[in-house]
């Protein structure tokens, strides 16, 4: 352990810590994490994997994460109870983990349906009422002098 910061709080760096990502079954292969954000982790394999292996990413295995190996969606498995792993085929070069929970997609569809329903109700509410101009009204006047009735 090496002291990194000393003050109110002391921060140590573990010099023997395991790497954040590594390839199990093909330890000579090198990789680099090229992009890290809350929703995306990109792992670039510096050279194509010569034989099938397993990439282990030491991030929490949580529902909603999707893995793509060279653009092809690949199932994620949980290893050591809490870490994400994907099986790599020979020749793999790029792995992208992205957070795409189904609840967000359902929420987007429900929001779109709600907006559509609101617009439909608004359009029906502002539409002018139908007029009954197609009906003809016949008025009959009765003359008390016994004359003929006039139709108006």
Image: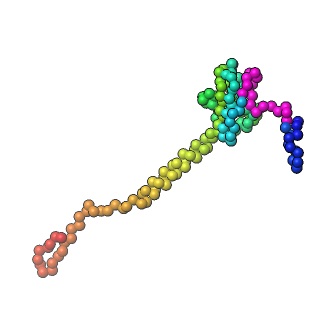
Q: Is residue 129 above or below residue 4?
A: below
Magenta stretch, main secondary structure, is: loop
Residue, x 75% and y 21% (percent of image)?
Answer: 28
In this view, the residue in front, 146 or 113, is 113
- Give, as a single range, the part of the protein colored magenta: 14-31
Q: Pinpoint residue 120: horizontal percent, then vertical percent.
A: 45, 54
Q: Pinpoint residue 13: horizontal percent, then vertical percent.
A: 85, 38
Q: Is residue 28 above or below residue 140?
A: above
Q: Pinpoint residue 57: horizontal percent, then vertical percent.
A: 73, 32
Quadrant of the rendering where the N terminus is positioned: top right
Q: Is residue 20 magenta?
A: yes
Quadrant of the rendering where the C terminus is positioned: bottom left
Residue, x 15% and y 78% (percent of image)?
Answer: 143
Q: Quadrant of residue 82?
A: top right
Q: Quadrant of residue 75?
A: top right
Q: Is residue 145 above or below residue 91?
A: below
Q: Residue furthest top?
A: 50
Residue, x 69% and y 18% (percent of image)?
Answer: 50
């Amino acid at each position: 352990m090496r002291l990194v910061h000393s003050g109110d709080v002391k921060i140590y760096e573990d010099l023997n810590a395991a790497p954040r990502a590594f390839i199990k079954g093909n330890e000579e292969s090198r990789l680099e994490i090229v992009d890290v954000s809350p929703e995306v982790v990109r792992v670039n394999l510096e050279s194509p994997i010569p034989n099938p292996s397993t990439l282990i990413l030491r991030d929490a295995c949580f529902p909603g994460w999707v893995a793509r190996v060279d653009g092809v969606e690949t199932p994620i498995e949980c290893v050591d109870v809490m870490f994400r792993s994907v099986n790599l085929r020979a020749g793999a070069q790029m792995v992208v983990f992205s957070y795409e929970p189904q609840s967000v997609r359902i929420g987007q569809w429900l929001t779109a349906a709600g907006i559509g329903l609101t617009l439909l109700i608004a359009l029906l509410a502002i539409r002018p009422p139908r007029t009954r101009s197609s009906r003809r009204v016949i008025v009959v006047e009765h003359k008390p002098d016994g004359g003929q009735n006039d139709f108006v």
